[in-house]
């Protein structure tokens, strides 16, 4: 079967994370959206449709997939920001159908001619395909980052079934509470003074993770490969990607990967990208004093989340100085540095130095030099296509002052 995974017109509603990656590369748990679909279709030919500005980067990320092919065959088209599950797919077998979740177009089963006509009309990032039949299905559709966060319990519960075959002997690891059957640890290092609490969900720990005690870990929780948890850390209801360094208090957070939040300070109801470094004492608010729902400014619009617990959303390569205070509903664009007293504005555009209460434009070449150093420290290289994308983002936001 041919599978076509696509971004739609709402991809920038996942700012700032979706500025530097396709929406299907956003982490939902131990998997990204795309990895979830791959696990559901292990033997299918997968093709990817992304925004034009992400085409080169996506080709580099996924060299075995066709990216933005000019011609397509009969196949199943799946929106890349849906948390797909096996039960959903049983409803998508009829040809010449398009599928909606409430009012949101999420999938299509199209002939080759229908797919080609759709591309001719502008494709997934501009239009919806034409088909004789429409159907409504129930899926876990996500339009905003906070909706991915609220799905953490369901996502971790689903993924725990795939960790059962690699479960390690936990007798010597730590103190355990509730149900040891809900802790799934691969080859990792865990000190005895770590306290696990599975009363609210499973705990999944990947190869190479290092958890130092005394610390408290409450499920649902996922810790990625080679992530280090410092002593005196408290983590609840979170997804921590690979190669992160974690400390302090973390509650209801998703981190893509390669990010440092090592020191004391609360981080809650938040989504962080890659190569972020939070200075010691960085703290975010996730609740307004009047208990009103939090509004977030993304994609040039103000969105009322309808939720009272909303923290912050931090793009790739962001750095904060010691003692930084982050307000509820704050969005920080990639390449930004924050060093100021008190709260700063809730929306900081990409490549901004916000220092002592004033906005300054980042010196791009200096930023690139630092980013290269940061990635080299983890044995990685900043690619030319990454530099080009980051420069495009900087120019685009500068032109829209």
Image (spheres, rainbow, N blue to C red):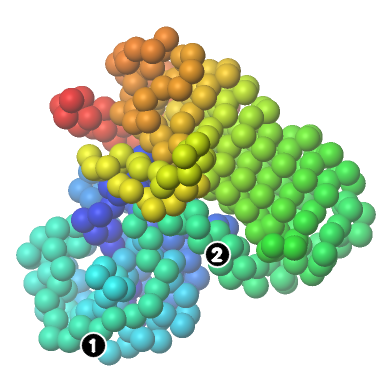
Task: Identify which residue is drawn at 75% across, 43% down.
Answer: 210
Q: Are there few (<14), some (14-19), or many (20+) residues within 10 Å of tag 1?
A: some
Does residue 159 lie above or below 228 as drawn? below
Residue 337 image position (x, y, % from top left): 43, 21
Disc number placed over residue 155 in the picture, else none: 2
Instruction: Choose between 123 and 285: the one closer to the eye.
Output: 285
* Label 1 with label 2: CB-CB less than 8 Å: no
Picture residue at 74% right of the left edge, 49% below the top? 217
| Viewer-side residue, 329 vs 213 | 329
| Callout 1: SS | loop
- Please report the residue visible at 45 percent of the width from the left and 28 percent of the height from the top: 318
Inter-mark Cα distance, 1 to 2: 29 Å
Q: Quadrant of the N terminus?
A: bottom left
* Left-right relation of 312 to 23: right
Q: Quadrant of residue 168?
A: bottom right
Q: Position of residue 351 (x, y in %)?
A: 33, 24
The quadrant holding residue 72 is: bottom left
Residue 138 visible in the displayed image? yes
Name the residue rendered at 67%, 27% in the picture: 263
For the question of whether residue 58 can be seen, the reply is no
SS of the residue under disc 2: helix
Q: Could you tell me which quadrant the C terminus lies in?
A: top left
Precedes in sequence: disc 1 or disc 2: 1
Figure check: 385 above or below 183: above
Q: Is residue 325 above or below residue 275?
A: above
- The residue that disc 1 covers is 95
């Amino acid at each position: 079967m041919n599978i076509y995974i696509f971004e739609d017109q709402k991809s920038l509603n996942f700012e700032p994370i979706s500025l530097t990656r396709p929406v299907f590369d956003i982490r939902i748990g131990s998997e990204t959206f795309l990895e979830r679909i791959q696990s559901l279709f292990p033997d299918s030919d997968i093709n990817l449709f992304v925004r034009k500005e992400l085409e080169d980067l996506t080709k580099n990320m996924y060299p075995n997939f066709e990216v933005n092919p000019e011609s397509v065959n009969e196949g199943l088209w799946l929106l890349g920001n849906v948390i797909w599950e096996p039960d959903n797919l049983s409803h998508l077998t009829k040809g010449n159908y398009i599928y909606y979740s409430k009012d949101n177009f999420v999938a299509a089963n199209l002939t080759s001619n229908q797919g080609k006509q759709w591309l001719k009309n502008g494709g997934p990032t501009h239009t919806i395909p034409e088909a004789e039949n429409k159907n409504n299905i129930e899926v876990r559709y996500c339009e905003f980052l906070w909706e991915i966060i609220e799905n953490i319990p369901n996502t971790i519960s689903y993924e725990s079934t795939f960790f059962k075959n690699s479960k390690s002997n936990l007798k010597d690891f730590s103190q355990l509470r509730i149900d040891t059957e809900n802790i799934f640890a691969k080859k990792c290092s865990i000190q005895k003074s770590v306290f696990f609490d599975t009363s609210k969900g499973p705990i999944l720990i990947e190869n190479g993770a290092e958890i130092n005690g005394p610390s408290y870990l409450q499920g649902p929780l996922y810790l990625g490969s080679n992530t280090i948890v410092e002593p005196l850390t408290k983590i609840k209801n979170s997804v921590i990607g690979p190669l992160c360094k974690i400390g302090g208090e973390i509650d209801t957070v998703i981190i893509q990967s390669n990010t440092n939040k090592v020191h004391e300070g609360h981080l809650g109801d938040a989504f962080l990208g890659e190569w972020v470094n939070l200075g010691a004492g960085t703290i975010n608010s996730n609740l307004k004093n009047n208990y009103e729902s939090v509004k977030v400014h993304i994609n040039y619009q103000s969105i009322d989340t309808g939720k009272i617990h909303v923290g912050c959303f931090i793009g790739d390569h962001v750095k904060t100085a010691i003692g930084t205070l982050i307000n509820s509903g704050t969005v920080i664009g990639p390449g930004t540095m924050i060093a100021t007293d008190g709260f700063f504005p809730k929306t900081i555009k990409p490549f901004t130095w916000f220092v002592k209460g004033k906005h300054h434009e980042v010196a791009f070449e200096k930023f690139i030099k630092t980013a290269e150093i940061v990635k080299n420290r983890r044995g990685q290289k900043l690619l030319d296509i990454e530099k080009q994308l980051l420069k495009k983002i900087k120019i685009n936001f500068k032109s829209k002052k």
